[in-house]
Image (tube, coloured by chain):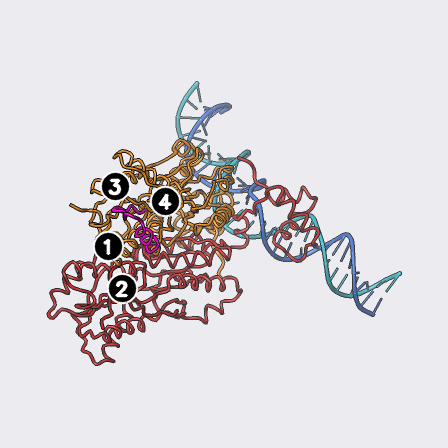
Chain colours: A red, B orange, C blue, D cyan
Amino acid sequence: MEKEITIYDIAKDLGLSPTTVSRALNNHPAVKEKTRKKIYDAAVEMGYQSNVFASNLRSKKTHNIGVIVPRLNSSFQSSVIAGMEKAVNEAGYNLIISQSLESYDKEKANVLAMFNSRVDGLLVSLASNTPNIDHFTPFIKKRIPVLFFDRIIENDQYTGIVIDNIQAGYKATTHLIEQGCKRIAHVIGYTKINVYADRLKGYKYALMDKDMPLDETLILHSDLNEESGKDIVEKLLKMKPMPDGLFVSNDACAASCLQQLKLKGISVPQDIAIVGFNNDVISRLVEPNITTINYPAYEVGEVAMKNLINHLKGDSDRVLQSTNKITLRSELIIRGSSLRK
Amino acid sequence: MEKEITIYDIAKDLGLSPTTVSRALNNHPAVKEKTRKKIYDAAVEMGYQSNVFASNLRSKKTHNIGVIVPRLNSSFQSSVIAGMEKAVNEAGYNLIISQSLESYDKEKANVLAMFNSRVDGLLVSLASNTPNIDHFTPFIKKRIPVLFFDRIIENDQYTGIVIDNIQAGYKATTHLIEQGCKRIAHVIGYTKINVYADRLKGYKYALMDKDMPLDETLILHSDLNEESGKDIVEKLLKMKPMPDGLFVSNDACAASCLQQLKLKGISVPQDIAIVGFNNDVISRLVEPNITTINYPAYEVGEVAMKNLINHLKGDSDRVLQSTNKITLRSELIIRGSSLRK
DNA sequence: CATGGCGTTGAAACCGATTTCATAAATTTT
DNA sequence: AAAATTTATGAAATCGGTTTCAACGCCATG
């Protein structure tokens, strides 16, 4: 085990003090250019590597940013994280990632772990059964910024990055109505979560605006994974008359429904038109392609991270404190699964 | 800004020394049970939180483990990371993640960043154009363990977690031959990477064993993403006679090929049988379902991480140093895209 | 009763960069 | 030329656990 080079070694070598070496390496203005150059050269030559531990201890900053998502292996979430990674890397921070697996208890444990490992900031998409956000109060107390994205709980203390889910649900439903659908079913996840609750609202508003009746039995609850299509289609088939429109709250599940419907000999979009959500890769790979709402996952990640970092770099809390919600643009992408002339 | 509680505060409060408090909180055996209890209670009551900076500075450990993958938003990689996250969390470490975006330069930058942020260990899946692994030597010099998974370069110094890609390629090709295919095309990525090179080897060995000629023009190179199906199918259509079997090195691309083939009026598996790779969700959602090789991504992540952590917890280098390669089981999953009676 | 050994505790050094405060040197002002 | 600033550098304290080494108290052994 070779011993590490410290600023003391450099200082001794050059006949300077550690103070000056430290300042030089941090580009402090009070060091003569010539001295700085000399120190830089010596540092490189001696193979000096700054000791982050010591630096962190003094500055009380880790340059680590925590991210908690419900699931890492989801097309949407992994794109969000890719966006975050890009932004975080450019700014010289590190990403610490954990997943709640949709469990409130695991989420609480993760939040605590992040707190103990002293992340400089936290980005969270909530688990589906998280009832409140009290577990984040330690962060607030220590003024460590917390941002929510996608799955949020509205609160004055925290900033949220979202799309307008009501509008998106409205657009999707209106589109189905305009394609001539008379009975539109809607598949959603746990309605305590803002995203599903809002999409449902949009669905209801659209029906209302087109003077169509709201039939609560057409609202189906599901896990929304790639296997749930079977259950959903079974339920659809039992309905008399069968719905002729289907708005599913994510693409993996929409694709699964599409597959099951085709297996049962039901043609899409003629017998039933489908709209998904997210614009995952899968929506473009099944036949027919699925009409969907483009949720700019990568951009959500990038915007959330950039906001957080700007906040950390700026010395005041003003930026984030005055920003309560950032809404990104989302649009309907019309494809074969819903287009009937 | 409230001031933090330190072990000095606890010590003063109880009339003990910081030494004893530190020892008690670390379950050091030389502290009387009664004293330990008293200290624990005081710590909880005072809201003490250990300062990881100070602890890290002395112990020279961050409890952070770095992961570098080519792309985060890939079905395979995000499952690997999910597996890692599970293992890492149970062991009380943190996961620091970055992506190389398939660029050697970015990978080098990431490796350096990981080194500077002093991760305790590193898990890497290499970028496609990484020519060698010299950029990891700083880690070796400081005896920080580095493990490769999936995309590896074989080397005595490092441990790799893989599946037997030769065998997998062999199984896939043999299956197509047994289904009566006479001209089997193979779509692969950059052949400098072990995974594609080995699958190609397996393909060649299978042909050889069945006394089938090897036609180099049937080997197609591609980016293997969900848009490359168009190019590939175009090339297939130009071949005379057209291949009647297709072994694609990942499922997203296989699904894309399947889609394009159907668009051109070519029926799968009758006109051309398809085998993919990975067993991504998508292979089960397209029609027909795609026959594929099950690559246990989650398990790869879990095994890689557990090995690394065992190594970190054990005090010697022996465990990892003697392990050069860990091969996980993979199997062929036969589905509609290749089954013809 | 003296000596050895174990169990328990504490004083002080340490990890390595940062920061405050002081000081010497160079420059400008009067 | 003396005084007032400005510029450049250093000594020492600091961040808060961890670790080394010493010491004290208690019991057992001879």
Using a 10 Å C-alpha cutoff, classify the residue at mark 3 as few (fewer than 14 neighbours), some (14 to 19) or many (20 or more).
some
Q: Can marks 1 and 3 be said to lie on one chain?
A: yes
Circle 2 residue: A290
Q: Mark 4 lies on which chain?
A: B
Q: Which amino acid does label 3 sit on?
A: Glu
Mark 1 or mark 4, which is nearer the start of the sequence?
Answer: 4
Circle 4 residue: B91
Q: Mark 2 lies on which chain?
A: A
Q: Distance between the residues labelled 1 and 3?
A: 28 Å
- Write down the quadrant of residue A203 in the picture: bottom left
| Element at label 3 | strand
Instruction: Identify the magenta region.
Output: B228-248
Q: Which residue occupies 21% across, 64% down?
A: A221
- Residue nearest the observer in this picture, A63 or B267: B267
Q: Which amino acid does label 2 sit on?
A: Ile
**Which mark is in front, 2 or 3?**
2
- Vertical placement of residue B203 versus A81, above or below: above
Circle 3 residue: B331
